[in-house]
Image (spheres, helix red, strand yellow):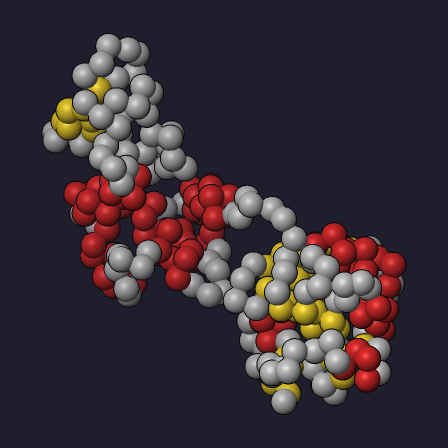
Amino acid sequence: MSDGPKTLREAIVYFANIDNCLDYLVPKRWPNGVACPICGSRSVLFMASRRIWQCRERHPRRQFSVKVGTIFEDSPLGLEKWLPAVWLLTSCKNGISSCELARGLGITQKSAWFMLHRLRLALQDGSGGKLGGELEVDETFVGGKARNMHVAQRKRRITGTGGKDKTLVMGSVERGGKVRATVVSNRNKEVLQAEVKKQVEAGAGLYSDELLSYEPMAMLRPPLLVACPSCAVVWPCTVAALRLLPLEMPDLHLTPVEYTFDPSTTPMRHK
């Protein structure tokens, strides 16, 4: 929302007026003028009392609103609820939960959960393809801390230490670009390298930690450069591999991918 409200207070005040919601959404929905979603005709009449349009052509469902054909369609919630939810979701770096959204908008948690599912689906990148350029990969275990669980739940779910009974998630982050997360079975090189080859295009600059599972990937043709941020070493540590690096090597760090897993991560940079 680059041309909309800049602060939460401005968003609440601005979108509280349904006419402001229409003024904001209509030019984005129909940049070349309002058109009928059924026949595409631009010969339409605006009915101000109901804030809908009616197509002058003869066909079924001549009347339509700005919500028709969008993620807002068939929802009893008005735009004065939907647009602040869009603003909150796109403005909060750490995301927003359905409970928090429900408290902020004064709706039920079920309605907020429904809204977030539609909004997140609309925000997905459907272009597909592989990641390229400079990117970072890392893994993490997801499953909660044992000390935060109830005793009964802990006995049922925790049967070992470390990553046992947790889900292993591998994340790939383009610097300044897309983020992808995938559930993997283990951290063996066969599994991780297969996932990297699936998600990353050949010749990309790949940054990771000291995990040896990524080491042989520098020998691919064209190579995937694997840089260790803690010691500034490229696998394998040979002169031939170092020559593959660009002359102006950026700072080695894993900030984006680690921040994706844990927003409280302290930025780490090594020159």
Q: Outermost residue toward the bottom? A: 271
Q: The C terminus lies in which quarter of the figure?
A: bottom right
- Whether 71 is drawn above or below 57: the answer is below
- Estimate the x, y position of residue 226 in percent, counting from the top left: 75, 73
- Whether 239 is drawn above or below 136: the answer is below
Residue 134 versus residue 109: which sits nearer the camera? 134
Q: The N terminus lies in which quarter of the figure?
A: bottom left
- Estimate the x, y position of residue 97 in percent, counting from the top left: 48, 56
Residue 205 versus residue 121: which sits nearer the camera? 205
- Estimate the x, y position of residue 202 in percent, counting from the top left: 72, 59
Residue 198 versus residue 257: which sits nearer the camera? 198
- Res 14 quadrant in image: bottom left
Residue 121 visible in the snapshot: yes
Q: Residue at x 22, y 35 (%)?
A: 33
Is 236 displayed left or right of 266 in the figure? right
Residue 154 versus residue 206: which sits nearer the camera? 206
- Estimate the x, y position of residue 239 in percent, counting from the top left: 81, 84
Q: Residue at x 30, y 12 (%)?
A: 60
Is 70 displayed left or right of 174 in the figure? left
- Whether 244 is drawn above or below 221: the answer is below
Is 109 displayed left or right of 240 in the figure? left
Residue 214 visible in the snapshot: no
